[in-house]
Amino acid sequence: MCIFCKIANKEIPSYIIYEDDKFLAFLDLSQVTIGHTLVVPKKHFANLLELDEETAKEALNVTRKVALLLKEKLNVFDFNIVNNCGEKAGQSVHHFHIHIIPIYKKGDLEFNAQSNKLSEAEFKKLHNKIIK
Ligand code: DGP
């Protein structure tokens, strides 16, 4: 059974800070910043693309509630909300989860992706490829 299914079944311990009938939120073992939390559906879905619509909607709602809880309790006002979807995107646990990473100061979490400078023609081509 996957590690987050075991956490959801309370077979292994975690620091749960929110729970309802469908979701759990618990402290990430590796605290990127203090209060780094994972929102996880109790049911197993491999990643974001595997969720049903209802669960996807609920996941964002729960994420908002948990961020509000952290705001209140940790006196933090900014967050990066992150989902790593797939191995190449950095997903290491293949049970859908959303990272809530409190940001206390600028630079707490840096995304180092280089940005591609596209010409107008390249933007048009890309846009057409996606919408057509
Ligand atoms: P990702 O790389 O997006 O799949 O994130 C997985 C996160 O899960 C990673 O930040 C570490 C965390 N993690 C892995 N195993 C455990 C565990 O057993 N307990 C807790 N609390 N967190 C875990």
Image: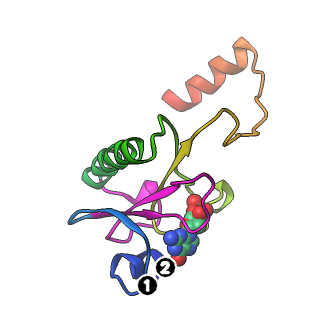
Would you say the residues marked 1 and 2 are in contact, meaning their CB atoms lie under 8 Å apart? yes
Respond yes or no on whether mark 1 lies under 8 Å from ligand 1. yes
Write down the region rendered in magenta: 23-52
> Measuring 45% from the left and 40% from the top, which residue is drawn there?
75
Reply above or below: 80 against 66: above
Give the residue pinned by disc 1: 12
Of circles 1 and 2, the one toward us is: 1
> Measuring 29% from the left and 45% from the top, which residue is drawn there?
61
Can residue 35 be seen in this snapshot? yes
Give the residue pinned by disc 2: 3
Q: Secondary structure at mark 2?
A: helix
Residue 116 appears left or right of 29: right
Which of 116 and 23 lies nearest the eye of the viewer?
23
Q: Earlier in the sequence, mark 1 or mark 2?
A: 2
Q: Amino acid at mark 1?
A: Ile
Q: Amino acid at mark 2?
A: Ile
Residue 132 in the image: x percent, y percent?
A: 49, 28
User: Quick one: which residue is furthest to the top in this view?
Assistant: 120
28 within the magenta span: yes
Quadrant for the N terminus, please: bottom left
Residue 105 appears left or right of 64: right
Residue 116 appears left or right of 2: right
Q: CA distance from mark 1 to mark 2?
A: 8 Å
